[in-house]
Image (cartoon, grey):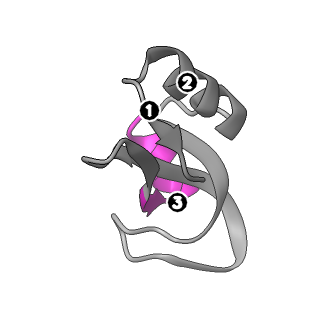
């Protein structure tokens, strides 16, 4: 899942955004059930790849409703 957030770099293109840019964080689930952002994508990468974003609140709700027991969002 991808959450919308301000990013300062794009891990996919190595582009930097010193003032921040509206991009995305890729959320992954670890073995302990912790869901966290593991990579950041800049706005150009998001647009080029037609990535669907959700708010952090929507992502937390999805994790709470669809995750396994003990899953939690850490973002």
Residue behind mark 3: 42
**Gap in Å between the C-alphas at discs 3 and 2?**
27 Å
Estimate the x, y position of residue 40 in percent, counting from the top left.
Answer: 46, 61
- Given the current orientation, which residue lies at the most extreme left position? 31
Which one is earlier in the sequence, the residue at label 3 or at label 2?
A: 3
Residue on which the image places disc 2: 64
Residue 48 among those drawn in magenta: yes
Is label 3 in a helix, a strand or a loop? loop
Residue 45 in magenta stretch: yes
Look at 56% across and 33% down and name the residue there: 53
Q: Earlier in the sequence, mark 1 or mark 2?
A: 1
Residue drawn at (51%, 39%), measured in percent from left and top? 72
- For the residues labelled 3 and 2, say whether their Cβ atoms are less than 8 Å apart: no
- The stretch in magenta equals 38-50
Left or right? Give the position of 24 relative to 19: left
Measured as percent of width and height from the top left, residue 18 is found at 67, 84
> Which quadrant of the structure image shows residue 19?
bottom right
Instruction: Examine the rendered structure and indicate whether residue 49 appears above or below residue 61.
Output: below
- State whether residue 19 is above or below residue 63: below
x, y percent for residue 10: 45, 68
Q: Report the Cα–Cα distance between label 1 and label 3.
A: 12 Å
The residue positioned 45% from the left and 34% from the top of the image is: 51
Q: Is residue 33 left or right of residue 61?
A: left
Would you call the spot at circle 3 few (<14 residues within 10 Å), some (14-19), or many (20 or more)?
many
Quadrant including the N terminus: top left
How would you rate the neighbour count of disc 1 (Cα within 10 Å): few for under 14, some for 14-19, many for 20 or more? few
> Which quadrant holds residue 61?
top right
Pointer 1: what residue? 50
Identity of the residue furthest to the front in this view: 70
């Amino acid at each position: 899942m991808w959450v919308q957030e301000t990013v300062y770099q794009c891990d996919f293109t190595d582009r930097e955004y010193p003032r921040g840019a509206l991009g995305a964080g890729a959320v992954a689930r670890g073995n302990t059930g912790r869901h966290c952002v593991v990579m950041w994508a800049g706005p150009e990468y998001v647009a080029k790849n037609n990535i669907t974003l959700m708010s952090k609140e929507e992502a937390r709700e999805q994790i709470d409703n669809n995750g396994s027991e003990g899953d939690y969002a850490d973002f």
